[in-house]
Amino acid sequence: MEEQVRSFLKSSFGDAIIREDDFRGQQSLYITPETLAPICEELLQNSELDIKYLSDITSLDWLGHEEEKNGRFEVIYNLYSLSHRYRFFLKVRLPGDNPEVSSLSHLWQAANWLEREVYDMMGIRFEGHPDLTKILTPDELEGHPLRKDFPLTWEQPQFSWNKDRPPEVIK
Amino acid sequence: MGLEERIPDSILLTTVDKMINWGRKWSIWPFGFGLACCAIEMMSTFASHFDLARYGMEVTRPSPRQADLMIVAGRVSMKMAPVVRRLYEQMPNPKWVIAMGACASCGGVFNNYALLQGVDRIIPVDIYIPGCPPRPEQLMDGLLKLQEKVNKGSVKDQHEEWGRKAV
Amino acid sequence: MPEEKTIELNMGPQHPATHGVLRVVLELDGETVVKARPVIGYLHTGIEKTMESKLYYKALPATDRMDYLAPMSNNLGYCLAVEKLMDIEVPEKVKWARACLAELTRVNSHLVWLGTHAIDLGAMSMLLYAFRERELILDVYEACGGQRMMTSYIRIGGLAHELPKDFDRKVRKIVTVVRERLHDYEALLTNNEIFIRRTKGVAVISAEEAINYSLSGPMLRGSGVKHDMRKANPYSGYENFDFDIPVGKNGDAYDRYLLRLEEIRQSLRIAEQVIDGMPEGPYRAHVPGVVLPPKEDVLYKMESLIFHFMIITEGFKVPFGAVYQAIESPKGELGFYISSDGSNKPHRVRVRPPSFINLASLPRLVEGRLFADVVCAIGSVDIVLGEVDR
C-alpha cells in the first residue's frame, strides 16, 4: 500500500514530493503548499486507493529548533483509507511570516472546523475558507496560543509568604 | 421575603430567625451549574446511591431565578466568566455559592492563560470543597456545613460579603 | 403584506439539555429550524499547551480530564502513543488488563449517555438506573487506582500498581448484573411508542456524508459503515478477543440507541474473556531509565532508587520524530499525535477529538426539522464538552 501511494503521487505530481519519512512504520510525505489542493482532489477521485477519510488537520511550530530552516510552521493532513485500513500523512511546510495554504473545505466538510481551530490556535490562514473566525479562545484574547512565543501565562500561587500581595502573573 | 429591608436596625429577631433558618436550610433548591468533570460527581450525588433528596435538595432548578444555591462544579474558563457573573446576578436573595472542586476554588490543576484561577475572583463564595473531583461524601459534607452556616444567619443579613479580596 | 421573519433563539451555555456548556444559536421559523450554529469554547482549558511544558510522565493526568466520562480511554491512548514513540514493548498481562479496563470504561460512558439521553426525551428514571449501575464500575476504578474517576491508572510502560486481588470477582459481578439489567432498560425504552416517535427518523445522516464529515464511532456505524479501530488497526491485545461490531441501517437516532446497547453487550463479552484467560506476569515493562521501577525495588535496591529519582526529576530523552496512535474510545476515534524534538518534554501533543468533529455535523442533522429534534440530536451525537474544547 505504501508503494501504491508513492507511485501514484510520483506519476501525477512528480516534483511535488520534497521528502519522505518513515518513522515507526508511519509513512509521511512532505509536499509543496501549492500542490496540496490538486493532490487531494486527485486522491478523492482515485477509487483504487480509496482514500476518502480525512482524520485530522494539525499544525506544529518549530520556532527555536534547527528544523526551522525548512519553514517555521508545519501543517499535517492525516488521511485514512477505510477499505485498505491504511493511514499516511501529507505534511506541508510554511514560512514564519504570513503563513497561508489553500483550504480543503470544498472537498471534505470536516475540514471546516478543523481549519478554524488551526487558525485560532496557530495563526495559519486558509484561502477559500467560508468562515475563518475564532472557535475556541475568547474574543478578547489576542494572539495565537499554541505558538511557541505565546507564554503559558501562569500565576504564582499564594503561599503564606505572599498572601497579602495580589497574585503576580508570570509570562 | 421582602420584609427584610423594611425592618429597622433597632429590632432583634430571635425565634423568628430560628424558624426561618430552619425552613431555609432544609429546603435549599440547588442550581446545579455543572460545567465539567465535577458535574458528573454532582449528578452521582443527586442519584440514588448517595441520595441528596433526604436533605431536602431534591428539586434542582435549571433556571437561576428559581434557585437558592449555586454549585459551581467544574473549571470556569475566561469565555465563561461573564456568563457565570450574569447568572449569579440573576439569582434572587438570599443566595449561597459553593465552589466545588479544585478548579472552581483556586484554578486547580490548570494554571494557564485560559482558566479563571478560582471562581471567587468574580462572585462571593461561601463554602469551598477541595478534590479533583470531590467524592460525593465530600460534597454532602460541604452541604451540611452550608446548612450550619445558614443556621447562624439572620433574616436581616445582606448577602454581599466577599470571600476574598477580588483582584 | 407581512414579510416572513425568523426568530433568533439562543440555546445558551447554561441549559439543562445541552450536555455541558454548549451554545447553539438557532434561527427558527415557527418551530422549524432554518439555521443552527454551534458556538463552543466555553470550557477551553489549554490542555495541549499545558502538556507541552511538562515532562511526559507529568502530562499524563491532564489527559484524564478531557473526556471525563471515559477517563481510562484517554490514558490508554496517550500511553500507547508514547510507548510507540519510545518503542517499548509491554508484557501480555498489561495488554489484557488494559483491554478489560477500556471495555469497562466503554460500558461506563454508554450508561451515562443512556441516562442523559433518556432524561432529555422525558424518561427520568433512566438516569437513576444508569447511575446505579455506574457505581459498580466506579468501585472497580477505586480498587485499582484509588480515585473514583480520574485514576491515571494506566501509565507509560504498564500500570500504576498491581491489579487488586478481587479484580476478577468484581468484574464478574459487573458482567452478570449489567447484562441482566439491560433487559430492564430495553423493556422501558425500545418498544416505547413515545421513544420511537421521538427518535425514529430524527438526526439522519447517510453513509457518504458521514465519511465526508469524518464522523467516527457509533455515528459512523449507525449509518452502515462497518469501521471500528479495534478490528481495523488492533492495539493492546484486541486481536486475541472474539467480539462483533454492530452496524445500523438508517443512520437515525433510534439506530444509534440500539447500536450502543449492543456495544455494551459486546464490551461485557470482552471483559468476560479477559477474566477467563488473564495471563500471569509483571505489571510493568522492564526498561531501565524510561519506565519507573516497582516501588518494592525502589525501597531495597540502589539502582532502582537512582533510576526512580532520575526519571521523576529529569524525565527521559525521546528520539526525534512524530507518531500517531488512534484508539476506539466510546465517542469515536480518539487519536494522539505526539511530536518530539529530542528533549524530555513533548514538543506538541495533539488530541484528535472525536466529539469536536462529530459536533461539526450538527447543522446538517437538524436544519429543516423541528426544534425538539435539536435536543434529541445533541444527545444522539454523544458529545463531551471537555473533549470538544480541551
Image (spheres, coloured by chain):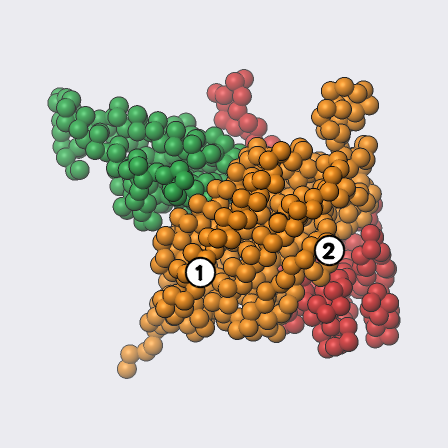
Chain colours: A red, B green, C orange
Q: Which chain carries label 2?
A: C
Q: What residue type is labelled 1?
A: Glu
Q: What element carries label 1?
A: helix
Are the residues flagged by discs 2 and 1 from a single subunit? yes
Q: Please, is residue A118 above or below residue A81 in the view? A: above
Where is mark 1, residue-wise?
C186
Q: Which chain carries label 1?
A: C
Q: Please, is residue A60 above or below residue A158 in the view? A: below
Left/right of residue C271 with respect to residue C88 in the rendered view: left
Give the distance between the C-alpha atoms of the residues marked 2 and 1, in whole angstroms: 30 Å
Where is mark 2, residue-wise?
C239
Q: Which amino acid does label 2 sit on?
A: Glu
Q: Write the residue at 58% across / 52% down.
A: C268
Q: Could you say where residue B119 lies in the image, as x and y percent from the top left?
A: 44, 36
Considering depth in this image, is C346 or C124 the residue closer to the camera? C124
Q: Count numbered badges in the picture.
A: 2
